[in-house]
Amino acid sequence: MKRLFLTVMVVSIFGLVVNAQEKFDKTEEEQNVIPDSVVIEEEYDKQTNDDEKGSTKIEVDVDWDNWDEDWNKWREKRKEDWKSSKKRGFFRGGAGGWDYYMMELKVDNINAKLVEIGLDPFDKNIFLSGGGGWGFIGHGIRVGGIGAGGKVVSRGTPFGGNDTKEVVMSIGFGGFTIEKVFHPFNRSEIYLGTMIGGGNMNIEFSQWSENSTWNHLWSGYDSTYTDGYRTYQNEIKTNYFTLLPTIGVRYNIFRWAAVGLNVGYVYTHESQDGWKMNGRTVTGIPDIDFSNVIYRFNIYFGG
């Protein structure tokens, strides 16, 4: 009986010691842990001191009876301040607009023929207008498309005759675009990209005698008309492959509107056997290649 009693006493004492040790450890842990409210207050005071030294001072009225709500307000305020310091003000989703191009025109073979029939060569530069659009797909990459067209005209009454001659050359292109965009500054972007697509060239030849008037247009079909009014008109056309690598910059005047400048190189490849007139192949046409540096001004709208 005595042995049993001693055993019980030893077990009881051991249990009390273990329980006391656990309570002591728990109390020690609680003493080492700073309440969240204290940490928050210290961080808030530290931020306030830092802001007093900096350019912006954050003033948040804290109700310590409801400190978690004030803490959330403080975090949101800091988040907005951080966002306002980041680069922005440029398109981030998609945009589209109007493009205006200028390219030096090198078509010596055509100009030589114009001189032969008594007309002036085409203008040195050709201007094209068109439009395009794109959308971002992530990682500063966007895809879209562009297209443009323009023409040059040479017209006159050569050699002191009565016949007016006119030659009009029209070119156009369009295709798929892909660009990589960088935003080094607020409201601006720099981009590299290319267009892959196709285009077409038309050359219209016209000649008419006397002045073109409303009455002449109708009287020319009258069998009794003997004034000698006549017209001559033909058109040849071809299609070609186009590649247009570019580099450009754009600046957002407003969040939704931007202007840009771009320089690229139009590469065209057309088959000399591809020229047609009224569906029939025209042979013997010399190599006509207007590949050259091209400049673009654009106004785009988006968000």
Image (spheres, rainbow, N blue to C red):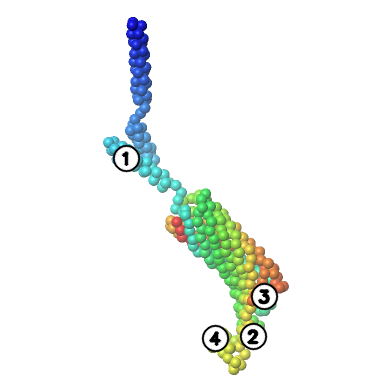
Q: Which label sits in the foreground, 4 or 2? A: 4
Q: Residues within 10 Å of mark 3 (few under 14, many from 20)?
A: few
Label 4 to label 2: alpha-carbon separation: 18 Å
Q: Is residue 21 left or right of residue 226?
A: left
> Where is residue 233 shown, x and y percent of the image?
62, 80
Judged from this view, the residue extending furthest toward the right is 284
Residue labelled with disc 1:
69
* Pair 2/1: label in front: 1
Q: Alpha carbon of mark 2 to alpha carbon of mark 3: how far?
A: 32 Å
Looking at the picture, does residue 259 appear above or below residue 116?
above
Is disc 3 placed on a helix, strand or loop?
Answer: strand
Real-space CA distance between mark 4 and mark 1, rounded to the nearest whole angstrom: 83 Å
Label 2: element kind: loop
Q: Which residue is mark 4?
A: 213
Q: Which residue occupies the foreground of this view, 171 or 32?
A: 32
Tell me if 231 is positioned left or right of 77 in this view: right
Rendering quarter of residue 263: bottom right
Q: Residue furthest top?
A: 2
Q: Nearer the viewer, residue 275 or 1?
A: 1
Disc 3 residue type?
Arg
Q: Which labelled disc corresponds to residue 161? A: 2
Q: Which marked residue is nearer to the observer: mark 2 or mark 3?
A: 3
Q: Is residue 143 left or right of residue 58?
A: right
Residue where numbered disc 3 is placed: 280
The image quadrant of residue 231 is bottom right
Q: Nearer the viewer, mark 3 or mark 4?
A: 3
Q: Which quarter of the figure is the N terminus placed in? A: top left
Q: Quadrant of the C terminus?
A: bottom left
Crowd class of label 1 (few under 14; some 14 to 19; many from 20; radius 10 Å)? few
> Which dot, 1 or 3, sits closer to the camera?
3
Q: Residue pushed farthest bottom?
A: 224
Of pointers 2 and 1, the one earlier in the residue sequence: 1
